Image: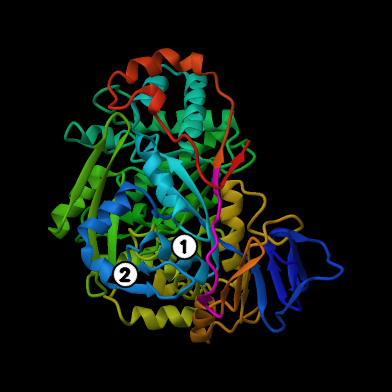
Amino acid sequence: MVSLEVRNGFVIDPMNGVFEVKDVFVKNGRIVESLDKPEMVVNAKGKVVVAGGIDVHAHVAGGKINMGRKMRPEEMRYPRFKSDNLRSGVGRVLLTSPAIGYEYARMGYTTVVEPAMPALYSIHTHEELDSIPIVDKMALPLFGNWHFVFKFVKNDEIEKLSNFIAWVLAKTKGFGVKVVNPCGVEAWMFHGNVYSLNDTDPLFGVSPKEVITGLISAIERLKLPHSLHIHCNLLGIPGNYEVTLETIKLTRRFENSERQVMHVTHVQFNSYAGESWKDMSSGAEFVAKEVNRNNVTVDMGQVILGHATTMTADSPFQYELFKIFKTKWSNLDVELETGSGIVPVYYSPKVRVHSLMWAIGLEIGLLVDVDKVVISTDYPNGGPFYSYPYIATLLMSEKFREEEMKKIANVERYSILPSLSEERTLEDVVKMTRVNPARILGLNDRGHLGENAKADLVIYDLPPEPNPRDYESILKALSNPSLVLKDGEIVVKEGRVVKHTWGETIWVKRDYDEELIGDELEDFFNYYTVQRENYGVPHVRREVVLC
């Protein structure tokens, strides 16, 4: 690992208030203040230098994406990388593990979060994460429909719930708390769903409102780096924006927290107005206003028109999607913990609803305060993650949006996107892809280029204030970085992956008293197919533990 100087580049580092020509120095995989004699000098004159990108929500490992690959063997007909120095990689949208790491690096991303790990299947998930090259990884265990959680919430035992969360994070090498359609997946196991925050699951009689607030209380008690990561109820259903607003309002009782207490993920899928598919319209304006006035953050969940594969722990939604598309469908219940479903889809520009979903995602990206929103596609649900440069360019250029809207079904009656003249700056995009994700996840050593930050940095052949009408140049530059460094090593040159490295898996450790929850563990493990002592992940390769 050589010491290195990036010279004369225009550094965009919003976290540290830097927007100027400045040299950046790298030693031992970290940013340092200066170097006397760097072993390598990179000339970045006329180009911008930013931190590596961070994806807060992408389904890149585990049982769901593997089942998706089995359901769609045609995905394997698309080769991506052929080189003596790289592993082979294939996939159109459902990429294989090596291709996932390479494609992230190729567009300047160096960290990714797998957001839905069934704790029972954590061994499989981590084995697959370990096979993704270059990028650092994290995984969020699923809690929102777990019998342990229901019992502790019902009895208002927040101390036990906190200990249980800490126990799960240690056992699964997890990073935080993920909730999907709280109580709805449990209701699905009894042939139902929940349709409001006050409905209750059929077994324990607890409501989504109680589960959400109970988990937030436990997370705050544990002082986890990341807040509650929530996939709201009634995802993908017309009129669901009202439930999303009510969910966001639950955070008001925690308004004294030092950081956001809820991250609403892929919020585009939960921003629909109307009473049916026939009159579905955008509720993004209402959702954005509520996000802006409360202690929450969001990621977009942008739809990319074309092929995608929906996969989520929201089993009832996937069944409804199956009935709409009348295509392949897979469903799975994970014992006492969660469930999942998978349905291949094609988002057609000729279909009004699909075009409207595309527009709603962009509305979210333009209307939510720039410090509260992150670019995402909910990969592979909304489309491929390697479309992020395309999304960023759409947000930066009204002209580009106008050109793209000519290709889709008319949505003017149902969306305000055609009337939005807002254009995000390059600095805004750096916030939405670097600064905000790092802050939301509580990762202090990335998302910026300050001293002792990880030397994950990207050089783009762009001016600091690109002309938004020259959107073709913006898209080309964002899609093909001049240089990408991971931990101080050059892994990409001129948009081409040149080195195979291995990233780290990050998980969070908190102290817990296993005796406090011992009786509940003994009771519930009578119903598991594994014994308590065999539950979880014994070790993770290349791990970093946040205490």
Displayed quadrant of residue 98: bottom left
Is 191 displayed left or right of 62 in the figure? Answer: left
Q: Which mark is residue 101?
A: 1
- Above-or-below relation of 132 to 530: below
- Above-or-below relation of 49 to 339: below
What stretch of residues is rendered in magenta?
494-506
Residue 359 x %, y %:
37, 68
Residue 453 drawn in magenta: no
Is 486 displayed left or right of 242 in the figure? Answer: right
The residue under label 2 is 92
Tell me which secondary structure the magenta stretch mostly adopts.
loop
Quadrant in which the C terminus appears: top right
Report the Cα–Cα distance between label 1 and label 2.
14 Å
Q: Is residue 239 visible to us here?
A: no
For badge 2, the amino acid type reads: Arg
Residue 262 x %, y %:
50, 42
Which numbered disc, 1 or 2, marks the residue that appears first in the sequence?
A: 2
Q: Crowding near pointer 2: few (<14 within 10 Å), some, many (20+)?
A: some
Circle nearer the viewer, 1 or 2: 1
Residue at image position (46%, 72%) is: 420
Query: Colour scheme in the image?
Result: rainbow
Pick whichever, 534 or 510, lies toward us: 534
Q: Crowding near pointer 1: few (<14 within 10 Å), some, many (20+)?
A: many
